[in-house]
Image (cartoon, helix red, strand yellow):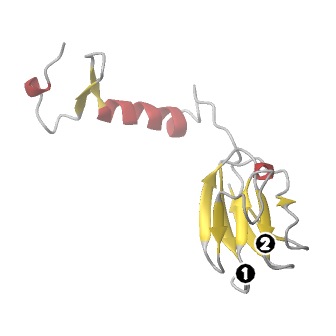
Amino acid sequence: MADIKNYSPRSGRQIKDNGTVVNTAEMIEAIYNGLIVNKNAGFQLTGSNALKGAVQNVTTAGTRVQLPDYDCREVTIIAKKTNTGSIYIGGSDVSSTVYGVELDANESITIAVGNTNLIYIDASVSGEGISYVAI
């Protein structure tokens, strides 16, 4: 097994669990070359390369609304600054009692997700909602 004491603290080398030595700088360079220089050669990127922003309201409080179908890598959800109640973010069972996140006016959360349609919202006040940005 390799001994980390044999390497300079600034060498960029790390010892993996299996005892092999890895040079972090070389790994970063390989990733950079694969993504930038060789235009994603050998890498499978998922989600969208485009930015989408929209507004979604909950017409009737207590009635969950699914975000539209849009492939993405992450979504930032922002409760509208004019909201007077709470916005509930979650899955297909979201409600005022079953939710992942509760947002007050102008609060936000970013969620790593492959499609915006996996996110549902509900509101404590009819007509209130969110804006969101997906990429």
Task: Please rate how many residues cluster around mark 1, counting C-alpha atoms within 10 Å: few if below 14, some from 14 to 19, many from 20.
Answer: some
> Residue 102: x and y, percent?
65, 67
Residue 116: percent from left, percent from top? 76, 52
Tag 2, which secondary structure?
A: strand
Residue 12 location in percent, x, y? 23, 35
Give how far across and how far down residue 108 sits, in percent: 61, 69
Which residue is denoted by mark 2 in the rendering? 123
Q: Is residue 57 above or below residue 24?
A: below
Q: Earlier along the polypeptide chain: callout 2 or callout 1?
A: 1
What residue is rendered at 25% in x and 16% in y? 19
Residue at x 55%, y 32% (from the top left corner): 38
The quadrant of the rendering that contains the C terminus is bottom right
Q: Residues under labels 2 and 1: Cα distance?
A: 7 Å
- Residue 85 is tagged as 1
Q: Residue at point 67% right, 71% down?
A: 78
Amino acid under label 1?
A: Gly
Height in image: 66 above or below 34?
below
Using the image as rendered, state which of residue 1 and residue 96 is in the foreground: 96
Q: Where, quadrant-wise, is the N terminus in this rendering?
A: top left
Residue for point 73% across, 83% down: 83
Query: Can you tell which quarter of the image residue 63 is in?
Result: bottom right
User: Within 10 angstroms of label 2, few (less than 14), some, or many (20 or more) residues?
Assistant: many
